[in-house]
Image (tube, helix red, strand yellow):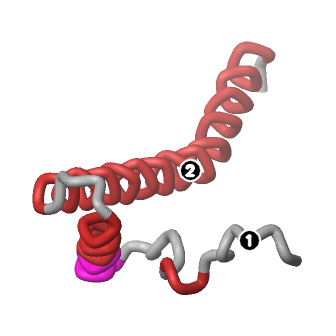
């Protein structure tokens, strides 16, 4: 086998071997970006429904955001307001 053919076959082997993980990473990145976009859409939709900054509106907005995330089978972030520390400083 000549040096030229060996270099071409080696280059083809390297390209073929490296496309698998790169393609898988690209698919995973696309899925992650789509999930983040949908999560942002859920937050925007919840804010449009409950735009006020009252405690009741905040709680309803958070519940609407979490319900939207569940409906789209996304991980629900954030906890309940009841689970948050009281802020009294006693720990």
What is the quadrant of residue 56 in the picture?
bottom left
- Label 2: state its secondary structure: helix
Q: Does the magenta stretch include residue 69?
A: yes
Span of residues in magenta: 66-73
Residue at left offset 53%, top offset 77%: 79
- Of circles 2 and 1, which is in front? 1
What is the quadrant of residue 12 in the picture?
top right
- Return the residue found at the far right: 91
- Label 1: state its secondary structure: loop
C-alpha gap between disc 2 and disc 1: 46 Å
Residue sitting nearer the eye, 22 or 76: 76
Q: Is residue 15 magenta?
A: no
Residue hosting label 1: 88
89, above or below 9, in the image: below
Q: Which of the two discs, 2 and 1, labels the residue nearer the N terminus?
A: 2
Residue at left offset 46%, top offset 74%: 75
Residue at left offset 22%, top offset 51%: 44
- Return the residue found at the far bottom: 82
- Return the residue found at the far left: 49
């Amino acid at each position: 086998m000549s040096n030229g053919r060996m270099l071409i076959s080696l280059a083809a082997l390297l390209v073929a071997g490296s496309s698998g993980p790169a393609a898988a990473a690209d698919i995973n990145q696309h899925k992650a970006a789509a999930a983040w976009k949908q999560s942002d859409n859920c937050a925007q939709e919840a804010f449009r429904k409950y735009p006020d900054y009252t405690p009741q509106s905040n709680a309803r907005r958070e519940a609407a955001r979490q319900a939207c995330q569940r409906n789209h089978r996304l991980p629900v972030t954030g906890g309940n307001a009841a689970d948050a520390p009281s802020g009294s400083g006693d720990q």
